Amino acid sequence: MASQIKIGVSSCLLGERVRYDGSDKREPYIADVLGRIFALVPVCPEVGCGLPVPREVMRLEGDPVHPRLVTVESRLDLTERLHAWCRLKVKELEGENIAGFILKSRSPSCGLFRVEVFSQGRTESGRGLFAAALTAYFPDLPVEEEGRLGDVRLREEFIERASAYRHRRKREEEAP
């Protein structure tokens, strides 16, 4: 339906087998319930930037504000590859007119809060590379992690914020 509000979602949460081990992290509430309310736009940064499924485990390393994405065994630095894809994808999502995004928690690409960043023998907290690019490009976009949507209050707030965002954007587009 053309008037349905579009929400971006990490592909693995919709049951797509795109994770490093070839599995998914399907969230029935997101796929089945929110999928009836919103038009869900699946996004997987790792597959999007050309990485295979399955693939080597990756993690964030270095500066928590500007971490590097590095494979654990072969030590391949994939940071620039993912950054280049993110720059293109956020512009594409702007054209999709998304009104919110639900990200996979703890992911080195999609994690929004408390993503492990390994630095000089200790672990610090950071944000996944795609989550960082998305929130920088769309600073007002309602964005949430799937685990936090288990909280009824946060879930309702997210839905209300996405609806308000869509309506505000439509008014801006229609303004002379």
Image (spheres, grey):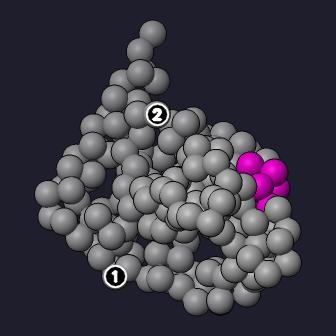
Which residue matches tag 2?
A: 139
Residue placed most toward the observer, 98 or 76: 76
- The residue depicted at 48 percent of the width and 68 percent of the height is 106
Q: Is 5 in front, or is 125?
A: 125
* Residue drawn at point x = 75 percent, y = 82 percent: 55
Marks 1, 2: nearer the viewer: 2
Asked which quadrant contains residue 121, the reply is bottom right
Q: Identify the residue shown where x is 55% and y is 36%.
A: 136
- Toward the front, the furthest residue is 121
Q: Are marks 1 and 2 in contact (CB under 8 Å)?
A: no
Magenta stretch, residue numbers: 78-83
Residue found at the far left of this picture = 153
Where residue 54 appears, as percent x and y from the top left, is 73, 87
Helix, strand, or loop for circle 2?
Answer: loop
Few, some or many C-alpha atoms within 10 Å of disc 2 (few <14, some 14-19, many ≥20)?
A: few
Which residue lies most toward the top here? 176
Foreground of the two, 2 or 102: 102
Residue 15 screen position, x and y as percent: 50, 83
What's under tag 1, amino acid-wise?
Pro
Secondary structure mostly seen in the magenta stretch: helix
- Tell me if I can see residue 89 in this picture: no
Question: Which mark, residue 28?
Answer: 1
- Give amino acid for label 2: Pro
Local secondary structure at mark 1: helix
> Would you place residue 28 above or below residue 140 in this image?
below
Quadrant showing the C terminus:
top left
Q: Is residue 139 left or right of residue 160?
A: right
- Image spot of residue 43 (x, y percent): 59, 63
